[in-house]
Image (cartoon, rainbow, N blue to C red):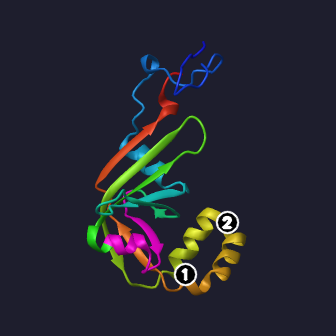
Amino acid sequence: MCLTARTRGNPPLTSARVLWQPQAMENPKMSAAERQAFLAQPHVGVFAVNEPGRGACAVPVWYDYVPGGPVRITASPTSRKVRLLRDAGRASICAQREGLPSAYVTVEGPVEILETDVTALQREIAERYLGPKLAKRYLESFAAGLGQEVLLVMQPERWWSIDFSKSAI
């Protein structure tokens, strides 16, 4: 099947493969268990906090999540996201599958900022994303800055999710 389209003076697409057809779509939403399992995988999340008078402050983050628990992130106490959180009190995080078929989970909720020792959590998160060997090197390289970070604890309240692998394409 061919897809033909014109956009802003560009030539028509004459041999594009159709990857998505609404009429063939089944319900691509994830169940509560599926979305929690997805968020528990080591995706890079995009953490977003409201910034009055502007678009949201949205930044990529590594995070920790165990199904049924809070989302945990460490951050510099002087970072823009932490400064904004002190006023907003809420944030969102979106994690996505990078390849096809696409899938994502977005969760939103209140965030606590805790001044506590985050060393053990930083090691767990680094190993989650890098494996033990690279995590050790990463933590040694950034030890001075990481030692000053605070813990952000988000309690998931609202969820959005889609998994296009559930659709009949």
User: What residue sits right under mark 2 in the picture?
Assistant: 131
Type of amino acid at the residue the image marks with label 2: Gly
Name, please, the residue furthest toward the top: 1
Label whose residue precedes the other's in the sequence (1 or 2): 2
| Residue 109 against residue 161 in the figure, above or below | below
- Tell me the tag on residue 25: none
* Along the line of sight, the residue nearer the viewer: 12 or 78: 12
- Residue 26: quadrant of the picture: top left
User: What residue sits right under mark 1 in the picture?
Assistant: 146
| Residue 73 against residue 120 in the figure, above or below | above
Residue 124: % across, % down = 56, 71
Q: Of tags 1 and 2, which is closer to the observer?
A: 1
Compared across the picture, whether 105 is left or right of 86 comes to right
Q: Secondary structure at mark 1?
A: helix
Report the residue at 54% width, 19% height from top: 5
Compared across the picture, whether 34 is left or right of 19 comes to left
* Along the line of sight, the residue nearer the viewer: 137 or 60: 60
Name, please, the residue furthest toward the front: 9
Q: Residues within 10 Å of mark 1 (few under 14, many from 20)?
A: some
Quadrant of the image for the C terminus? top right
* Along the line of sight, the residue nearer the viewer: 71 or 52: 52
Tell me the distance, in whole angstroms, between the alpha carbons under discs 1 and 2: 18 Å
Type of amino acid at the residue the image marks with label 1: Leu
- On whether residue 73 falls in the magenta region, the answer is yes
Magenta stretch in the rendered image: 68-85
Q: Secondary structure at mark 2?
A: helix
Report the residue at 33% width, 70% height from top: 85
- On whether residue 2 falls in the magenta region, the answer is no
Residue 71: % across, % down = 41, 63
Report the residue at 40% width, 69% height from top: 81
Residue 73: % across, % down = 45, 69
